[in-house]
Image (cartoon, rainbow, N blue to C red):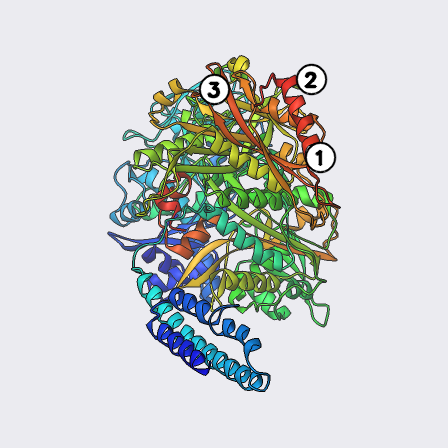
Amino acid sequence: MRVPLEWLKQLVAVEASAEEIETRLTMGGLEVEGIEESAIGPVLDVYITPNRGDCLSMSGVAREAAALYGAPLHLPSPPPSREGGAVSEMTSVTILDPDLCPRYAARIVRGVKIGPSPLWMQRRLEAMGQRPINNVVDVTNYVMLEIGQPLHAFDLSKLAEGRIIVRRAEEGEKLVTLDEIERTLQPEMLVISDGEKAVAIAGVMGGLHSEVSARTTDVLIESAHFQPLSVRRTSRLLGIRTEASYRFERVVDPDGVRRAADRACELLQQMGQPAPVEGIVDVCPSPITPRTVTLRVTRAAELLGMDLTSHICADSLRLLGFDVLTESHGPTDTLHVQVPSFRPDIVLEEDLIEEIGRIYGYENIPETLPAGGATQGGDSEEGIFITRLKRTLTACGMQEVVTHSLVAPSLFESPADADRLVAVRNALSAEVGGLRRSLLPTLLDAAQLNARQGQRQLALFEVGRVWQNEPTDDGPVPVEYIAVAGLLAGPMGEAGWQKDTTRIPADFAMARGVVERLFADLGIVDATFRALQDRAEQLPQFHPGRTATISLRGGHPAGVIGEVHPAVAAKLDMRERVVLFEIGLNALQEAATKTSHGFTPLTRFPSVSRDLAPRLPEEVTYAAVASAVRTANVPLLEDFRLTDVFRGGPVPAGTKSLTVSLTLRADDHTLSEAEITDALTRIRAELTERCGAVLS
Amino acid sequence: MSDSIMQQRQEAEEALRGASSVAELTAAETKYLGRDKGLNELRRTLGALPKEERPAFGARINDAIAQLSEQFAAKRAELQASEMQARLRDEAIDVTLPGRPYTAGRLHPLTQTSDRIKTVLGGMGYQFVDGPELEEHDYNFAALNYPEDHPAMDEQSSFFVTDSRLMRTQTTAIQGRMMAQMSPPFRFATIGRCFRYEAVDATHHHTFHQVDVFMVDEKISMSDLKGTLGAFARSMFGPETLVRFRPDFFPFVEPGVDYSISWQGRWLELGGAGLIHPNILRAYGINTERYSGFAFGLGIERTHMIRTGVSDLRLYLENDLRFLRQF
């Protein structure tokens, strides 16, 4: 809402500068977003919150300013018209849908000479962003800006039978509006019609046919009250947003209807036009009774947390135009407050309390802390778990990223189950067309962006929400999950000046190392990695030979780890190998050890280390070897780990040699050579039998 | 015989003087004072002496050994000290050379900011809870006292996913979810991602993060809200920070304010706040004569921007490492 200072000062006796008024209005709840210069001086750009339709006029802003400054208010008071009179013989108003139009008033001015409006009016209209058109149209716009009531002027000679009918539109009814566009109307829209046809869309825009033109001599001025929701829906359905519809949506004072029509006639007369036809047609099938709200002063003081008297409360409310009907004094002061018709937002005691606080000044509220008992605060269980994950991943040297949830279809997506992607219904661009089903595509985007910046070492992770459609009896329903994902690419580690500094290119094993670290920190001991291989069609975006699905506690795959398919990597313009992993948070949470393991006493007996180097057929996996070692079920075996994989040289083609380092220990004695030999024999036997191992 | 002691002693002293390293000294010491060597070897000749001469000869050997041992110890200390000095001199490095670079993973600035907020509010007794980003339309609007199809919703154009669900436009949507489960008194907070259909520029984004804080107890007032915001703001932005209220409108609070903090000589608008609207409390069966509550919200990006001077909101979701590594 643009507020010319010159006009404001005409309505309220305030001597302050534009900047002072800016601060006072802003602190009072009318936020001044800027001050601009115009032909008539400074203009304040005031943001009006959606609940304060009454402030969408100069009078409304002036009323607030008057209350905030305690200054006298001078609102226009045109000579009031009398209902009926001569005008009721010239026209009639019929409201067929009073639910959408509780009130409709009409006045008529005959013998008007159409021409430009006076310069002072044009200047004010321009300062408020309106284009002057002619004296009659300008007056209707001017009154709207002055009092907030949108008006419409019809050329009376163009109204069939010279009368007004307010009704819902007929299905498919057509109307060419002022902007010369033919509109097709629907039955939920309210129209103004004459004896034959629609002539205006109620509260939104007038029709071209009955508009005031240079040849117009008799005008009918409409001043009406329309139901806000109806205007809002019509305006949205038709895609027309006007100054009138904007105001009607935010509730216009139903009691200002007649005054606005009278004011328009007064202004026309002041501009040298003929006096209006005597009287007004004012159809008000649903009169509005003023609302009374009770205010307890102690309650106001309690909620605002400051000392208040009934005088302070009553004075603040009166300044805003409320009628304080009764004041009873004493410790239980109660005010009965009649709410003015232009403030439909005031319904509850709390609404009045806000008005008092606002006018008395929020700067008078002291700072206290809630008195109640102490409560246990802290992060949610989910939040604590996520913090644990992030601690491990950052300790592995990975940088956290936060990427978009709303995404365009990515190259890195399996086209197989596109129907599981959740779409945004009202997306205007593909960029925000769907909800991500995986964190990997946006993680790749982040990697790409940084690769283009010349970053070669990329170790990124994200924890975030993902969505996919899940089948239900009622069809697919989008379900929200949390996933944790990582990306490694390029040479890891930092090159320094020392000769022994090495940078290791990211590979599957490196990503697996991170995932294993994560599992270890979460106390997850039973994760299995299963090669993708013959299921490659499930995840075509991954390298079929360098990808595994991850299952926890023997369940369904809860995640994936693998290298991006070389063909996909080429399309993404990534030159280094890119390794990714993604795991569902739910599965991790379920698999993670919730209780402490307790404590394993430190034994004082020494351990013995022995290496085995089985030679194995190439197709035997490490998982098979590890499983064979475990199956041997040697209680003395404390731990074992792979220390070498060797091919070539003395190892025949088609075979490989793995070196497994075994740690043996007993809790209660030092191992004897016989025990060690026995343990090794059993493990060798398992390796030979299960893996076809040859042991030297 | 006594000449042999003297001779041994002179030889030993000569060797001692000639030793230029701890190793040479040790060799000399072993030669003259070692078991069955040098002076100790002379002891064996004791038996050959007349009985009356033995004590005196023995005493002289012991004397010589004791004196030599002392001399060797002193020389050893001297040599050790100079050897240590030489070693320290040789081992000196250029300490101005750069260290070995160490790759450390870092948390995203939004996480760092959220963590700090969680610590502060957790310490003030607020329990953090989590709500869905794909939220019920009702929890996002109707439960928060938005009248049906009200212009207030225009300020929050939504991404719709189904007839009844949208991407939440505000973390405030958690309030109805919690009030449906809990009875007062309670203090809750949530941090999460919100979505509004807006054109993206340096200060607007369709995706952003918010914290929403609310509590209900007996006799909760605007001054409690101001005090809580003051304590919170001083923990986040420094002990001198002041809080100011300005009237504003949000359907879910009454009175509604937006609050600003004093920052480097200016007032910076931080977020919306107010007393929880009685319509909401009553809808969840809370007796508004006994209980009242307050709520406030805050942008995570905004908080970080104030603390660091970042001026472009878009940087947070771009994930340029040159940006992320600064925090």
Q: Earlier in the sequence, mark 1 or mark 2?
A: 2
> Where does residue B85 sit, x and y in percent of width and height?
35, 69
Q: Residues within 10 Å of mark 1 (few under 14, many from 20)?
A: few
Q: Is residue A320 left or right of residue A500?
A: right
Residue B292 coordinates in the image, percent (x, y):
68, 56
| Residue holding disc 3 | A651
Distance Cα–Cα, label 3 vs label 2: 59 Å
How would you rate the neighbour count of disc 2 (Cα within 10 Å): few for under 14, some for 14-19, many for 20 or more? Answer: few
Rounded to the nearest whole Å, what is the CA distance between mark 1 and mark 3? 30 Å
Check disc 3 and give the amino acid type: Val
Describe the element under mark 1 as helix, strand or loop: helix
Nearer-the-camera pick, B299 or B278: B299
- According to the picture, the residue beneath numbered tag 1 turns out to be A674
Question: Any mark on residue A531, and which?
Answer: none
Q: Label 2: which residue? A: A473
Q: Viewed as shown, does residue B292 lie left or right of A452?
A: right
Q: CA distance from mark 1 to mark 2?
A: 65 Å
Q: Nearer the viewer, mark 3 or mark 2?
A: 3
Q: Position of residue B56 (x, y in %)?
A: 54, 86
Which mark is first along the chain, 2 or 3?
A: 2
Callout 2: helix, strand or loop? loop
The answer for which chain carries disc 3 is A
